[in-house]
Amino acid sequence: MKRLNKKAVTATVALVGTLVLGSTVYGLAQSKHLQETRTAIEQEQESLDSLSAKLESYQSKDGYLSKDLTVEKLDEIKNSLNLVKDSYIDFHIEKDDLKEDIKVIKIDKKAIKQELKVLNRKLIVQKAVNSLFEDDVLIGNKVSKQAIAHPITEGQINLVKTKYIGSVSVGSKWENAIKSIVDEATSQLKQVRKAEQEVIKAYKNNSVIEGVSRDTYKKAKTEVDKVVNQTIKDTLSGNLGKVLEVIEDNEAESERLAKEKEQAEAQQVQKQSTSGTKSSSSTSTKSSTTTTKKSTSSSGTTTKKPSSGNTSGSKSDGSWTAEDVVKTGEGSIKNHGGSQEGSNTYETGTFVIPSN
């Protein structure tokens, strides 16, 4: 066997020593890198915990969104989340190195992304629902009474229902509030339509309906008073004001005509009463005079006018002559009804029938 010379032995020992030393140095360096990576992973985990806590602060246990929550703030969280490292490539390590630690990062990051998506969706839904009204109805966990926006249509409300509310499940107080707010918008718009229909019965095409009644006006006003939106209410009330003005004018005219008719009827009754009295008086006088004349004629009475203005006479052959005859008046007899004088005349007077 050939023996190695001294120089060869020395070189071999040096090479082995170098390899051992190199391996040791590499091992120490690798261990240090893994430790630094582990620290980096812990820092990423802390970032995720911070982002998760921030998201939780934007939502109450009942599901209500914080009044401070905005799209911009959610975008900030999204951008920060995208910077979180979650793979062995990001950390410059072998695939199997720190596998479990990186797996935790992946799971937490995915959960935060999902929560971020949910919050963003809820914020969009809440904004869409609030847009149905003049002012925001839902702020934080407070629900206030507001008037629906003007103008607004059934189509707009239905769009919110189908596009947004359909994805909201009933459960949390926020979800229940969202649905009730949309129902309120629907109810208010129905009332507006009902009021408009009643007003049209009294006022249409910028003019008052001819012959409109006060009952029609009252029904319309009752429905208009229930409208919450002040702008819509003022417009409808203005039209009803014109209706009321016409109604009052018509009622005043009807009252005037009724009074005139009443007065005319009263005058007619009074005229008929006066005419009847005159007719009765004339008829009575005519009858009395006629009887007197007939009595005088049948009895053969003759009169003579003494110087004193009195007439006297005495019995002769079964007849008698009136004594102390005094004429008190004369005149023409009027036709029936007292409207015109006729050709007949009458005289009135007093006399005494002799005792013998």
Image: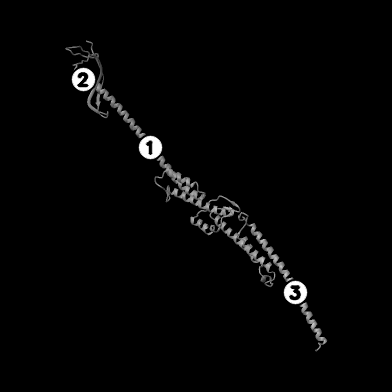
- Direction from residue 299 to residue 3 in the image, left or right: right
Q: Residues within 10 Å of mark 1 (few under 14, many from 20)?
A: few
Mark 2–mark 1 distance (CA, rounded to whole Å): 54 Å
* Front of the two marks 1 and 3: 3
| Mark 3 surroundings within 10 Å by alpha-carbon count, few (fewer than 14), some (14 through 19), many (20 or more) | few
Q: Nearer the viewer, mark 2 or mark 3?
A: 3
Q: Nearer the viewer, residue 274 or 71?
A: 71
Q: Secondary structure at mark 3?
A: helix
Quadrant assignment, res 258: top left
Q: Is residue 19 visible?
A: yes
- Give the spatial CA distance, label 2 vs label 3: 172 Å
- Whether tag 2 and tag 3 are in contact, CB under 8 A, the answer is no
First in residue order: circle 1 vs circle 3: 3
Describe the element under mark 2 as helix, strand or loop: helix
Name the residue carrying label 1: 258
Q: In the figure, 289 relative to 107: above or below?
A: above
Q: Between disc 2 and disc 3, whose residue precedes?
A: 3
Amino acid type at circle 1 is Ala
Task: Give the residue pinned by disc 2.
Answer: 294
